[in-house]
Image (cartoon, coloured by chain):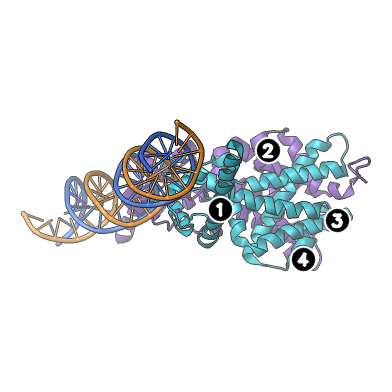
Chain colours: A cyan, B purple, C orange, D blue
Amino acid sequence: MDTTQRTEQQRSADRRRRELLEAADRVVLRDGPQASMNAIAAEAGITKPILYRHFGDKGGLYAALAKRHTDALLASLRAALDAPVDRRERVESTLDTYLAAIEARPQVYRFLMHPAEGSTGGDQGFDVGKHSAPLLRRMGEELAQVIEERVDLGPESQRLARVWGHGIVGMMHAAGDWWLGERPCSRADLVRSLADLLWGRLAAAGDRVGGPGF
Amino acid sequence: MDTTQRTEQQRSADRRRRELLEAADRVVLRDGPQASMNAIAAEAGITKPILYRHFGDKGGLYAALAKRHTDALLASLRAALDAPVDRRERVESTLDTYLAAIEARPQVYRFLMHPAEGSTGGDQGFDVGKHSAPLLRRMGEELAQVIEERVDLGPESQRLARVWGHGIVGMMHAAGDWWLGERPCSRADLVRSLADLLWGRLAAAGDRVGGPGF
DNA sequence: GACTCGGGTTACCGCTAGTAACATCGCACC
DNA sequence: GGTGCGATGTTACTAGCGGTAACCCGAGTC
């Protein structure tokens, strides 16, 4: 009996937690990452201390929020990464999946990338250096693993795969961030250009003639 | 007389401003990006309102601070980028310059990349989306310009150069960030691995045999 | 000597994250 | 059927933040 009762309570608590997260989501999407705990509590129809009972502190809430979105994005990326097509096509479709996601929900994306974990008093939020962008790290590790599984890189394969994983993710992220702000071209163009870069087109291109000097 | 007097005052003000920036620098390097205006004022031996008279608001101070470091870093990168050697060597030395800089002064680097412009009351700091990482943007544009000047990319050269500029900078940044945290290999190894990636080694590598499934 | 004017300070506002203390409802247990 | 107890919720508070208004004082000028 004790156990069933416990699970009963836990279920209720979990549902509560999910409701709170959804309210927080709405507020963060509306107000950006600097949404206040007061605002979130109000949106959920309750008051602050309840939020703190559930999530510890603001960092905890934001981490829980970020985890949901990160998991979702990673799942769709994994699908693109696992498709049984040739490598170039896989790379392009993964890039496109990521870009489509940030294009569809830029607010979510900004929240994940720039948590802006302000906090003034006390400040025992999460550490700046270590948790600043967990999404990038997770994507990098994930990609590293796929690369190492799938590509034959010789003796130093593990190190190379990890460097490349993080490097490619960073490339995708920075280019996406810039593209989202300026929209200088279509998504397909961007995908193709980035894939070209990874395919060594920079190295293969010739020097420009008639350039400045020399 | 009026003009000389004016320049006299302006000089004094500029010197003051530089002193304040140096004090701010010390505090930010010690306390991280969430250093408070009070702390900075105290370090400079004065009180808050003076800071606000000089820099407007916290965003202004941080922007001024960031500009100094950004300019310095960009100058050394430009030197590496302009060296009259072959492309691969130039790419490697630019990567190495950047990595050496963030390795030598990780606190500065963290400040530049993760401004964490918290702020609670009033919050009219600088806008999150637009100024979140000006260093990355500036580096991306700079690199794009160099690429377009130096490399022959055919008809779409301008677009390609910009995409690649931001992409490569992002790759460098993310890989550097990860490397700085985990130190999984030497700087030279990292530089070589990244250059290999840009040189198309990922595309050239064969599929792994005996991998999972298939 | 009155008068402005730039550099400086004190004292405050409104806001934030986070907490302590009190109220209340449901429910098992004797 | 009363009774303790634990979860849920509230009000009222603290400490500290960014930012500002008001005053203050010494140096130069007529």
Give the total of numbered labels: 4
Taking the image as shown, residue B65 lies to the left or right of residue A70, namely left
* Residue A94 drawn above or below residue A149: below
Q: Which residue is mark 3?
A: A88
- Report the mark closest to the observer, 2 or 1: 1
- Report the mark closest to the observer, 4 or 2: 4
Q: Which residue is mark 4?
A: A188
* Residue A105 drawn above or below residue B85: below
> What's the residue at 87%, 44% (across, down)?
A151
Amino acid type for the residue under numbered disc 3: Arg
Residue A190 image point, x, y percent: 74, 63
SS class of the residue under badge 1?
helix
Amino acid type for the residue under numbered disc 2: Trp
Q: Which residue is mark 2?
A: B179
Q: If the image is split into quadrants, where does the N terminus of chain B sit?
A: bottom left
SS class of the residue under badge 4?
helix
- The residue marked by circle 4 belongs to what chain? A
